[in-house]
Amino acid sequence: MAGSAGDLVRLVAKGHGRSRAELARLSGMAPSSVSLRVEELIDAGLLREDGEGASRGGRRPRQLRLHENAGVVVAVDVGTHHLRMAVLDLAGRVLLEHELPGDITEGPEQVSERLLEHVRMTLRQATVEQLPLLGVGIGMPGPVDPAAAKVIAPSRMPGWNEYPIGRRMSELLGVRVVVENDANLMAVGEHRYGWPDRDNLMAVKAGTGIGCGIIASGKLHRGRGAAGDISHVPVHVPEPVTCSCGHSDCLEAHASGAALRRTLRAQGIEVSSSRQLVELVNDGVPEVTTLVRNAGRLAGQVLTPLVNFFNPDVLVLGGGLSAAEPFVAAVRGAIYERCLPLATRDLEIATAVTGRDACMLGAGALVLDEVLASEWVDDTLSAR
Ligand SMILES: [Zn+2]
């Protein structure tokens, strides 16, 4: 039976337990015991109760919320070319966020140093100064073993293989650290903040690389760590391009932002990022538009059997390339052309609701889950 102080806090955090009466019903505890626990949690500064007192037309029920000052988490999206960071309160609301340029190829030691420096600087900012840091969630642009909190055999990330980024940051900051692949985090972020009522969702992150995250029955599906990896699915292409995995017909080697930039470089067009690629599409540069549309067609080829097979409620398109209309239109076209009518009947194909924040918000959501599932609530109560 659910009944610990931690269980009550989790029910409030998820928005299910908005009053003492709801908590009693959901936890199966006696109303008097719930009231006692809630008083303890309010005294400990973990919960607060709004809307007290009578209002015209009768007594308004008092609404329970997590206390903003109970603590914060930091969420980080480590991109190939950026570090995006936010401080979130326990309800998952963003208190402040900022982005700075980064370079993942500088290697793990240098990136970790920068990360640490910026987490500390962010926390020093006035609004969060007094609030305890409870955890950090980090998204990485490569395959992650979430149990070991390590990046495993990433492409385009020299020196990062097996680097224990989670343990390192946890030692330096003295809090729990969750590490997850960016496409998985995009799926979590979009599910929690964009489509909370849809249970099955696929989120494609098409940026420098191409990945996919899966929400199945409301939960992130990791498999054994590699679930959703569409980078190395073979596609039909006229000219082979050798992929980091050694094959010559992988989706990522032909349709990722990195692949498109390489092709353009060979044509004498220098492009530094996916964002710039999209600007050239918006400026109507025909070579670039053709390439981006073709990338969308290839991604659509790969996604078509997956949409039939998994039959999601929502297919989210995110990452830098999703800001290019020809890419989105080509994916959409391929799916509606080839998927079974039953698979597309109620399918939503949408660009990321949370935009560039998706991975960061997903990292925040995962670390908040961990904090609230931990013994933190009981420890906070017993430390008083
Ligand atoms: Zn490959």
Image: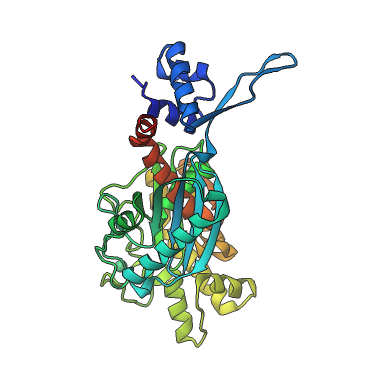
Q: How many marks?
A: 0
Task: Give me the residue at 43% from left, 64% from top.
Answer: 117
User: Which quarter shows the C terminus?
Assistant: top left
List x then y, in percent, for residue 60: 65, 18
Does 240 appear above or below 59? Answer: below
Seen as rendered, the residue at the extreme bottom is 268
List x then y, in percent, for residue 84: 49, 61
Q: Quadrant of residue 234?
A: bottom left
Task: Give me the residue at 40% from left, 51% from top.
Answer: 136
Asked if one can make out residue 208 in the rendered structure from this viewpoint, the answer is yes
Residue 346 left/right relative to 111: right
Residue 117 versus residue 255: which sits nearer the camera?
117
User: Which quarter shows the N terminus?
Assistant: top left
Q: Quadrant of residue 230?
A: bottom left
List x then y, in percent, for residue 225: 28, 51
Does 366 appear above or below 235? Answer: above
Asked if one can make out residue 156 in the rendered structure from this viewpoint, the answer is no
Task: Give me the residue at 52% from left, 55% from top.
Answer: 357
Residue 296 versus residue 175: which sits nearer the camera?
175
Task: Give me the residue at 34% from left, 62% from top.
Answer: 142
Does 294 appear above or below 267? Answer: above
Quadrant in which ligand 1 is drawn:
bottom left
Seen as rendered, the residue at the extreme front is 384
**Color encoding of the figure:** rainbow
List x then y, in percent, for residue 4: 36, 24
Residue 374 left/right relative to 342: left
Q: Quadrant of residue 287?
A: bottom right
